Image (tube, rainbow, N blue to C red):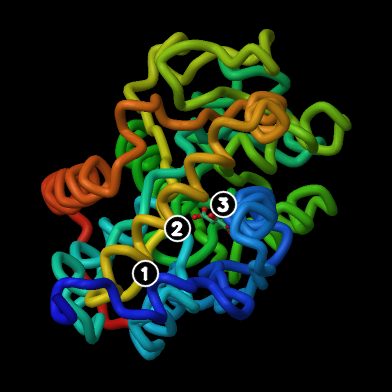
Amino acid sequence: ALGLAAPASAQTFPSRPVTLIVPFAAGGPSDVIARLVGDHMGRTLGQQFVVENVAGAGGTAGAKRLLTAEADGYVLLIHHLALAAAPALYNNLGYDTQTAFAPVGLVNAGPMVIAGKLALPPVDAKSFFPFAKAQAEKLTIAHAGVGSNAHLCAVLMSQALGAKFAQVAYRGTGPAMNDLVAGQVDMLCDQSTTAVPQIQGDKIRAYAVTSTERLGVLPNTPTVRETGVDLEMTIWHGLYAPKGTPAPVLDRLNTALRAALKDPTVLDRFKSVGTNAFPETEWTREAHAKRFGAEIAKWAASLKAAGVNPQNVN
Ligand code: MLT
């Protein structure tokens, strides 16, 4: 019977604070989602979730940091589709993406917003895309490192327009957004999570959203497809523990995550920035594992089609 029982440590988990690694700079969309959901999970589990921003190399530095931790549930990683895209972008990750992580659960899914600094001449999507194509070489587009959502969006936009922009890498779209607001860079394709508040505050100009439908919170901003440009992108975040974390610990974490995704306060915050919780049918650890595997395959194929070759991490 002893061998079948969960270890005592799993039964009392968590008995001390949990570190939640965010693989990008503070103030960006991953950080915003992590703090919102982490705070809620901490309240549910009676232990604080402490965010640690480990930025670098498009989110792969944070992923590596997770894998140096004990597989006991006290160090977790929130990451987005870049974790699945990374093997198509980097040669020497130092871990096997397919097997290194224990998916805890899916968090949120939402679109990106293609935005420009207020001083950029085009005032709408219709004039923006021809302008961006014609002026490409002179225009800078910010992103959060190779493999970040902002980078992948820039790659897809370049591919759709047949235009090459000057890319500027940041440690997250938090600092990238600050520079867009200040007019230091021309363009940024960022998650709605952090783009919507800046658009509503008239700090940047929204050109188009990458979803199939317009966003309720940005009713006047067209989809990219509406403007005749072939680009669609949905980003998603998931929560991960290191492989080998005991199943009872993963289950407790999954239950706490579900409590956050059920809370109307959390859902209202999501909605106010144009992002969504996953449907309840996808709240299991298995659903997360399945999506993760599918996205690894999807990004390998689409980045190959876009002519993107893997590079070294450093
Ligand atoms: C961030 O939090 O900085 C992001 O999730 C960046 C990105 O992937 O575009």
Is residue 314 visible in this depiction of the protein? no
What kind of element bears circle 1?
strand
Q: Which residue is mark 1?
A: 241
Q: Which residue is mark 2?
A: 253
* Quarter of the rendered structure image containing ligand 1: bottom right
Cα gap from disc 2 to disc 3, whole angstroms? 37 Å
Q: Which residue is mark 3?
A: 141
Cα gap from disc 1 to disc 2, whole angstroms? 10 Å
**Residue 303 point in image, percent of width and height:** 20, 51
- Label 2 vs label 3, nearer the camera: 2
Quadrant of the frame with the C terminus: bottom left
Mark 3 is on which residue type?
Answer: Ile
Task: Give the residue furthest to the front.
Answer: 1
Residue in the picture at 16% in, 75% down: 96
Q: Do the CB atoms of the residues marked 2 and 3 lie less than 8 Å apart?
A: no
Q: Is residue 163 above or below residue 268?
A: below
**Residue 92 point in image, percent of width and height:** 21, 84
Residue in the picture at 55% in, 42% down: 189
Quadrant in the picture for residue 228: top left
